[in-house]
Amino acid sequence: MVKYIDLLLPTLLETIYMVSVSTLSAILLGFPLGILLVITEKGNILENQSINSSLSLIINISRSFPFIILMILVFPLSRLIVGTTIGTTASIVPLAIAATPFVARIVENSLKEVDKGIIEAAEAMGANNFQIIFKVLLPEAMPSLILGITLTIINLIGYSAMAGAIGGGGLGDLAIRYGLYRFKTDIMIASVLLIILLVQIVQLTGNKLATVLNKKR
Amino acid sequence: MISIKNLSKKYTSENKIVNALNHINFEIKKGEIFGIIGLSGAGKSTLIRCINRLEEPSEGNIFINGVDITKLNKKELRDLRKRIGMIFQHFNLLDSKTVFDNVAFPLQVSGFKKSEIKERVERLLSLVELSDKKDEYPSQLSGGQKQRVAIARALANNPDILLSDEATSSLDPKTTKSILSLIKKISNEFNLTVVLITHEMEVIKQICDRVAVIEDGEIIELDTVERIFSNPKTETTKSFVSSILNNSENEIVYPKIPNSKVIKLNFLGDTVKKPIISQMIKNFSIDVNILSGNINELQTTSVGNLLVQILGKDKDVNKALNWLKKEEIRWEVIWNG
């Protein structure tokens, strides 16, 4: 039992560490991109066809890379940001980069659901673009944004299993190394169960938050 | 107050140029309730949205208090919009904010202090009789209540002008009535100029002082509501007016008696109250058969219509009709037997 805990606890913490930091980074990078995608589309407050289509293209391209390739491609960037290309911290860089365009699309979809009439009403009141984004678009889309972030976190938990390839550690890595390579089925089952538990907790929390926000309106 | 000069709006849709508005000219006076009526696609929505430049005019000028708003830059335009309230058909309230915060929103946008916002919002909510709902969310309100919140929100910055974009079109008749009387009350109280668009003549009848009829991007008739009601000139206007009268003359079935005439009489103002028909029968040797009639109460006066069939010798009938003219009753012959 002690052996299990010694093995599982540090890897669980590694997973939580990788996923939370990369989620935060992806939100910081992806939100502005998603907002930009929406406000530059046709008929919106900062309509700009060339920015919109080039941004969309870049996002599509970066989403097309298989994650395992992306991890290797961003080595120079990882070295620049965290000083190394292997280890848990180093794997945060490709995770964040993989999740950023995903978050951008999630934000785009959520903001597009906001009724155009509400934006127009805000414009008619003399609100500037900054006020429309932060006081109208984001608050109105909040429940949908929260569900989108939940989806991102769960995707990142899955991706983080591949981080083992560059020595990232984490639960997924443990399952592969012990279960697949060394036939320790019990460890594999334990780590997979932990991942399932983690995903459940994230999803339930996200659902709960979105419901609470929705109930008020 | 608002002066629209040579206003045109064109846009391209599927490579075709659509003339939404065609060289429109008119003026709206301070404090009046000005209605714009038209069928869907006539251009009324485009027209009202040009007044706060939610729609950019392609040509022409719009002067508000002498300032040409088509020349304003973005910052000046935002300041102008704070002086113009607007309400919408679908209310457009912020679902994520309470009633209080919805009304507070334009004040926050304008950068008012918190204490001042609180005081103003409370006063506005009591004006629209929704003080008890201030902590509720829009989804908990009825359509009429939502529009009241929207009206309070539109008035938050003490505007000079209120634009109403089909504000009662998604409400039931009873709620429509109460929203219209609220707009009327506010307009009187604050000397607010109201521009409203609608496709319902009932709305025009209930609160407007003057009305413009718009069709295919052009204003085809513009006059006081009494004159539009009593003497509509174009077919479109006639059909709008008859839409709220009980019967139009085309639908009335009357016996086609030889040597009789079917006449439509038109009463305006004080003549509504006079016993014209009984006097006419006493004075001339004619018989009168009443086919249909109605009276509409407008803002400042009443308009009545009466469809009668007059039987008698041509000489007597003509005398009677001449007498009607002297009594300032307008008439027209609908059928001549």
Image (cartoon, grey):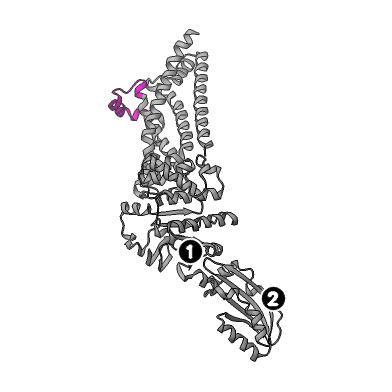
Q: Which residue is mark 1?
A: B35
Describe residue B280's horizontal placement relative to residue A59 as left or right: right
Residue A203 on image: x %, y %: 51, 28
In the structure shown, which secondary structural element does the residue marked by tag 2 occupy?
loop
Disc 1 from disc 2: Cα separation = 34 Å
Q: Nearer the viewer, mark 1 or mark 2?
A: 1
Dot 1 and dot 2 within a common chain: yes
Residue A29 on image: x %, y %: 36, 34
Describe residue A161's horizontal placement relative to residue B39 as left or right: left
Q: In the depicted view, which residue is nearer to us: B310 or B40? A: B310
Q: Main secondary structure of the magenta part?
A: helix
Q: In the depicted view, which residue is nearer to us: B321 or A139? A: B321
Quadrant of the rendering where the N terminus of chain B is positioned: bottom left
Residue B153 visible in image: yes
Q: Is residue B324 above or below residue B106?
A: below
Using a 10 Å C-alpha cutoff, classify the residue at mark 2 as few (fewer than 14 neighbours), some (14 to 19) or many (20 or more).
few
Image point (31%, 60%), residue name: B71
Quadrant of the rendering where the C terminus of chain B is positioned: bottom right
Magenta extent: A71-90
Residue A19 on image: x %, y %: 42, 25
State yes or no: residue A75 in magenta.
yes
Residue type indicated by callout 1: Gly
Q: Which residue is mark 2?
A: B253
Query: Which is more N-terminal, label 2 or label 1?
Result: 1
Which picture quadrant has residue A84?
Answer: top left
Using a 10 Å C-alpha cutoff, classify the residue at mark 1 as few (fewer than 14 neighbours), some (14 to 19) or many (20 or more).
many
What's the chain of the residue with tag 2?
B
Residue type indicated by callout 2: Val
